[in-house]
């Protein structure tokens, strides 16, 4: 159903000639939610959080893939699942053709040597009770890669030198508490590369470090990749470092990839409204380059009750009818409106509506609103129609009303019906190699086609 | 900076303290304990060192008991002459003699020996069993954890002396009224304490990133427990150990007092001596109960002080950084050069 | 009751004026000179950005100004609060009780981690009631609610959430609540210590927008402590760059970022990764140990343009024609060549020590 992306890792002429190291198809990672006490006794999960929900990726040897998104986007879960630290609940992950998504802990252990991870917090990634010599060399012992103490010491010294902890003798006997944040992350990197891995998943490796150290660690990672022929998955919320560091970039939102393609292309011409918003949100230190920008409202929604259709639609400034408008959005719209009004006016408007808490439930395609005391359904409809008219005149236009199919009175209540939601598919944009999951793009594409 | 594990305060400069030999790596946890002890100041320092000195004296007394005590613990005669019965302290018997003509000084000294033996055995047994079970329970969780927690909580819910008495009866049937029996019955009381503390810290350490990193490296659970959990979990143990040591002396004496501990023919025991001395007090003979009682109080005090001191020093929530008042030297204001004025003047 | 908001005036007297402030901490190794002779002004409605690497004394300075330093710290210098309630008093000389009374109605603080400052057992309404009642005893309940809702509305929190508990809000919402709590007493001066570090990019941008709008809507002066230079460029009128307990450069934010003067500011800007980054650059070494800071200019061991004299003689503060003040010998000698004599013979020769710093000697 989905076309493979035409990924060209920069630095290599023909992208397709590089072998695929990891292939991910329809990957799903769902976490069961613990429900009520009774539900737990019954063994029933209250629901599932779709941390990763149908992801397709191909990671080529020598590529740097950036997984970018806010917290709650599933980027970290995806990165961890790639190397088997989280269990996939569906789909497949193939590492060099071998299916690894269903493997148990024991079967994965030999593979761990080749699939390494660098965690976000360098202060917590090293055992505080273990010195650097033991910590960095531990993968060698675990996988039985050395025969003698001399060989062990030589490999550890070599790894420390590679990550810039020189002279190594100075660091061998130290404990993590003796090292600074940057030094710890270097030690973590030394531990990650000592067993000669192929794939390194780096989960926000620089976000906990001081500004002036970040560039050093990124440079080190680039050097290591060049010297050791590594492939990286770089998980981050920082688009600026991803732009510099990655060959390919996947923008994630609420468990799905919304835009995926070569970094240069994605940054030069972002397609998805979410990508555009993320790019606009980065503060620019050079005042000559700073521009006024439009920020999306609100925050990333709760993954346990995701919005219908496109998950980004409640925050999207350009959403269309089929993006998945629902009852919750009406409530949010009204609350936003009342924030800007004087308290008396908003109180008067609130009095029009009888059951204001009802439209808060997720996933309602229609909502019926009881009129408030001494008001009729017609009053409510009139109010909503007035809002729609005001909105059509405003700039930027409120996209919510595009999703409203009909408003009518029914047995004394005002009923608002929304357009049926459609999930946006990840579609390839010809020539650019970028895939994007947005109805707007599909509209544009079909318009061109006819 | 986010610090998930309590660490001893260490200078923040990259140039850290002098390097320990790489071999000491295994005792990283102990090294930090020692560093914290050295940095202790004020009341905790006083408690720690007073407790340590008293405890050390007690240990010396116990170890060299046969050399220090003038007679054996069950000696009631010397050179064929029987010791006086209930004799007041004098030159031959500094602490007097008991109704059985036993030398109180010797019995007190030998009592220390018994107390130490039972204490060490009880603490070692409960430490090994409690820490091991706590680690397994905390790391693996699941049904093993549930069962162990249930058993331990049940043990914990018993009044400890009652539990020791019951255990004493059970073990006495197997091993007789020996030192081992006393130690085992006390062990049962302390295992839940180690189990709880170790399980709790293993539970939190299990979620630590470094444990996950170990998993990501491909380490087996046994390796993770030995190399990553143990060193971090063990830090809370020394405090309980010293507190338990103090408690073990009291429990042993309690058992002895009730006549359930060690058989009087096997060893001298303070609690037993005290119970025998009760009647003497009414008869105005203070020495038979004063000395064993005093020895017991001092020994318990020593270990309690040591434990409390250690707790103050090692427990990060209790620890306060020593602060020294700063005296600011006179400030020399920075010179200023004003280019705007300069250009205006020219 | 309410403070009369006057139109923002650039040339108005500073609401806060700090002169030669020093905050030294006592440690076992000796005093840490976290803030060591710092002078700056904050005018009404102005936002001052305070930037620098970790361990440069930014947070200490922020807390020192508010009198929130630990008992073991020694503070001297002049922190004059010229607001209505401050009445030109020197905050470093006030008793704990006196400054406690100023905190809230005159001085506000916004923290990095909002969740640690909100009581999880108290509703948002109770937080506001407590804040308002502490400083305005006898304020009627209706008035409390009206003021609280007004502050919350300004932060985009709907009225329907007023009775919720802190855990029912997202991280961004909590930070908004914290800001509303700080603003509800209408303080003249607020210190915001890394208010967006724990937040996501988009939410961070929203909060920065709110902070930038503060000066328009509330006429509140703000000191914004951050390590993110982009945020300063975005939200601040003026910027002060801190290094090793000193302010090495301060001036109009646009001017400083467009044409940085001090080598540290230049290096800091170059090492920041932004969307326009095409090559990685970094400052060698790490900020010095403030127990024994380097002689002369404290930045000289890492400075790419250090001269021999920089290692021994402390540089003067140079006020440049643009109004930017930079504490560097380079500018001093440029402005007044006669000062070069003070650097000693051969004092202007380049200092070659920079390259010897190991890559790993970093923070």
Image: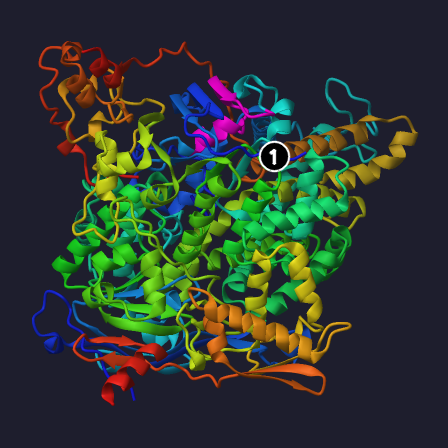
Identify the residue at the far left of this view.
A13
Label 1 Cα neighbours within 10 Å, binned few <14 / some 14-19 / many ≥20: many
Residue appearing at x 69%, y 79% in the figure: A377
Quadrant in which the C terminus of chain C appears: top left
Q: Nearer the viewer, residue B50 or A357?
A: A357
Quadrant in which the N terminus of chain C appears: top right
- Judging from the image, mark 1 belongs to the subunit labelled C
Where, by quadrant of the figure, is residue B11 drawn? top left
Where, by quadrant of the figure, is residue A328 drawn? bottom right
Is C336 magenta? The answer is: no
Rendered view: C86 above or below C129: above
Q: Is residue A80 visible?
A: no
Residue appearing at x 33%, y 41% in the figure: A180
At mark 1, the secondary structure is loop
Q: Position of residue A48 (x, y in %)?
A: 52, 77
What residue is pinned by disc 1?
C104
Q: Nearer the viewer, residue A371 or A155?
A: A371
Q: Is residue B314 visible?
A: yes
Rendered view: B25 above or below B339: below
Is C74 magenta? The answer is: yes
What stretch of residues is rendered in magenta? C59-85
Identify the residue at the far right of this view.
B282
Q: Position of residue C138 (x, y in %)?
A: 77, 37
Where, by quadrant of the figure, is residue C223 drawn? top left
């Amino acid at each position: 159903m989905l076309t493979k992306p035409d990924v060209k890792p920069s630095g290599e002429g023909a992208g397709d000639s590089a072998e695929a190291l990891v292939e991910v198809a329809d990957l799903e990672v769902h976490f069961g939610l613990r429900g009520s006490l009774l539900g737990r006794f019954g063994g029933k999960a209250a629901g599932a959080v779709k941390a990763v929900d149908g992801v397709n990726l191909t990671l080529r040897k020598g590529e740097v893939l950036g997984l970018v998104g806010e917290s709650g986007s599933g980027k970290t879960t995806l990165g961890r699942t790639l190397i088997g630290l989280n269990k996939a609940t569906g789909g497949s992950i193939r590492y060099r053709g071998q299916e690894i998504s269903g493997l148990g802990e024991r079967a994965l252990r030999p593979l761990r040597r080749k699939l390494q991870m660098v965690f976000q917090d360098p202060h917590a990634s090293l055992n505080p009770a273990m010195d650097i010599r033991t910590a960095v060399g531990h993968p060698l012992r675990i996988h039985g890669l050395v025969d003698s103490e001399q060989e062990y010491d030589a490999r550890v010294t070599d790894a420390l030198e590679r990550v810039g902890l020189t002279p190594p003798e100075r660091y061998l006997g130290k404990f993590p508490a003796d090292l600074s944040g940057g030094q710890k992350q270097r030690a973590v990197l030394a531990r990650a590369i000592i067993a000669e891995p192929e794939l390194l998943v780096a989960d926000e490796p620089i976000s906990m470090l001081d500004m002036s150290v970040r560039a050093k660690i990124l440079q080190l990672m680039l050097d290591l990749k060049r010297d050791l022929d590594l492939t990286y998955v770089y998980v981050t919320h920082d688009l600026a470092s991803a732009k510099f560091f990655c060959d390919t970039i996947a923008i994630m939102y609420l468990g799905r990839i919304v835009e995926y393609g070569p970094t240069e292309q994605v940054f030069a011409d972002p397609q998805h409204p979410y990508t555009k918003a993320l790019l606009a949100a980065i503060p620019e230190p050079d005042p000559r380059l700073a521009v006024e920008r439009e920020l999306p409202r609100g925050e990333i929604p709760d993954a346990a009750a995701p919005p219908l259709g496109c998950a980004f639609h409640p925050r999207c400034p350009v959403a269309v009818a089929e993006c998945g408008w629902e009852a919750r959005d009406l409530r949010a719209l009204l609350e936003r409106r009342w924030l800007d009004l004087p308290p008396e006016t908003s109180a008067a408007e609130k009095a029009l509506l009888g059951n204001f808490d009802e439209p808060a439930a997720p996933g309602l395609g229609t909502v019926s609103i009881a009129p408030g005391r001494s008001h009729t359904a017609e009053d409510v409809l009139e109010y909503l129609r007035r809002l729609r008219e005001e909105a059509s005149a405003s700039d930027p236009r409120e996209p919510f009303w595009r999703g409203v199919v009909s408003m009518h009175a029914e047995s004394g209540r005002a009923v608002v019906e929304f357009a049926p939601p459609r999930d946006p598919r990840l579609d390839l944009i010809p020539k650019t190699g970028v895939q994007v999951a947005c109805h707007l793009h599909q509209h544009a594409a079909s318009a061109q086609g006819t | 900076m986010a610090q998930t594990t309590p660490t001893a305060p260490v200078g923040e400069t990259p140039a850290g303290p002098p390097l320990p030999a790489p071999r000491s790596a295994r005792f990283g946890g102990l090294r930090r304990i020692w560093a914290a002890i050295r940095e202790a100041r004020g009341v905790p320092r006083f408690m720690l060192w007073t407790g340590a000195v008293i405890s050390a004296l007690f240990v010396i007394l116990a170890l060299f008991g046969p050399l220090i005590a003038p007679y054996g613990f069950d000696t009631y005669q010397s050179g064929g002459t029987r010791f006086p019965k209930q004799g007041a302290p004098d030159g031959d018997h500094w602490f007097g003699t008991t109704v059985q003509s036993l030398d109180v000084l010797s019995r007190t000294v030998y009592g220390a020996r018994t107390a130490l033996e039972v204490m060490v055995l009880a603490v070692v047994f409960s430490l090994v069993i409690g820490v091991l079970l706590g680690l397994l329970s905390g790391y693996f969780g699941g049904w093993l954890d549930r069962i162990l927690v249930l058993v331990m909580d049940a043990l914990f819910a018993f009044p400890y002396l009652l539990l020791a008495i019951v255990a004493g009866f059970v073990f006495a049937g197997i091993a007789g009224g020996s030192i081992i029996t006393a130690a085992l019955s006390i062990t049962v009381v302390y295992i839940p304490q180690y189990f709880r503390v170790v399980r709790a810290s293993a539970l939190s350490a299990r979620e630590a990133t470094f444990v996950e990193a170990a998993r990501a490296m491909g380490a087996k659970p046994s390796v993770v427990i030995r190399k990553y959990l143990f060193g971090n979990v063990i830090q809370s143990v020394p405090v309980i150990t010293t507190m338990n040591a103090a408690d073990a002396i009291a429990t042993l004496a309690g058992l002895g007092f009730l006549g359930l501990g060690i058989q009087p023919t096997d060893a001298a025991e303070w609690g037993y001596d005290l119970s025998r001395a009760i009647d003497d007090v009414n008869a105005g003979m203070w020495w038979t109960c004063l000395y064993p009682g005093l020895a017991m109080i001092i020994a318990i005090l020593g270990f309690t002080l040591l434990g409390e001191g250690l707790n103050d020093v090692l427990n990060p929530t209790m620890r306060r950084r020593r602060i020294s008042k700063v005296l600011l030297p006179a400030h020399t204001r920075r010179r200023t050069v004003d280019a705007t004025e300069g250009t205006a003047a020219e | 009751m309410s403070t009369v908001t006057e139109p923002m005036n650039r040339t108005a007297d500073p609401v806060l004026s700090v002169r030669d402030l020093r905050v030294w901490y006592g440690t076992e190794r000796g005093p840490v000179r976290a803030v060591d002779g710092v002078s700056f002004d904050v005018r009404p409605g102005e936002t001052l950005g305070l930037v620098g690497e970790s361990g440069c004394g930014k947070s200490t300075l922020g807390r020192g100004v508010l009198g929130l330093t630990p008992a073991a710290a020694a503070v001297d210098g002049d922190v004059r609060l010229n607001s209505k309630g401050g009445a030109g008093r020197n905050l470093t000389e006030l008793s704990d009780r006196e400054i406690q009374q100023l905190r809230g109605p005159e001085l506000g603080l916004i923290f990095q981690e909002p969740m640690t400052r909100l009581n999880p057992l108290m509703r948002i309404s109770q937080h506001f009631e407590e804040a308002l009642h502490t400083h305005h005893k006898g304020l009627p309940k209706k008035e409390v609610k009206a003021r609280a809702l007004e502050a919350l509305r300004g932060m985009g929190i709907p009225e329907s959430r007023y009775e919720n508990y802190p855990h029912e809000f997202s991280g961004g919402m909590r930070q908004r609540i914290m800001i509303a709590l700080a603003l509800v007493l209408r303080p003249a001066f607020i210190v915001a210590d890394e208010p967006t570090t724990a937040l996501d990019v988009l939410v961070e941008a929203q909060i920065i927008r709110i902070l930038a709008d503060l000066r328009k809507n509330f006429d509140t002066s703000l000191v914004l402590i951050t390590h993110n230079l982009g945020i300063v460029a975005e939200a601040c009128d003026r910027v002060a760059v801190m290094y090793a307990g000193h302010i090495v450069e301060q001036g109009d934010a646009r001017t400083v970022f467009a044409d940085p003067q001090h080598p540290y500011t230049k290096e800091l800007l170059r090492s920041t990764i932004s969307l326009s980054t095409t090559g990685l650059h970094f400052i060698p070494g790490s900020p010095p140990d403030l127990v024994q800071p380097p002689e002369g200019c404290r930045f000289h061991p890492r400075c790419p343009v250090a001269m021999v004299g920089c290692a021994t003689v402390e540089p003067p503060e140079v006020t440049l024609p643009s109004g930017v003040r930079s504490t560097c010998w380079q500018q001093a000698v440029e402005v007044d060549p006669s000062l070069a004599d003070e650097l000693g013979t051969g004092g202007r020769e380049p200092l070659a020590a920079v390259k010897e710093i190991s890559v790993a000697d970093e923070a």
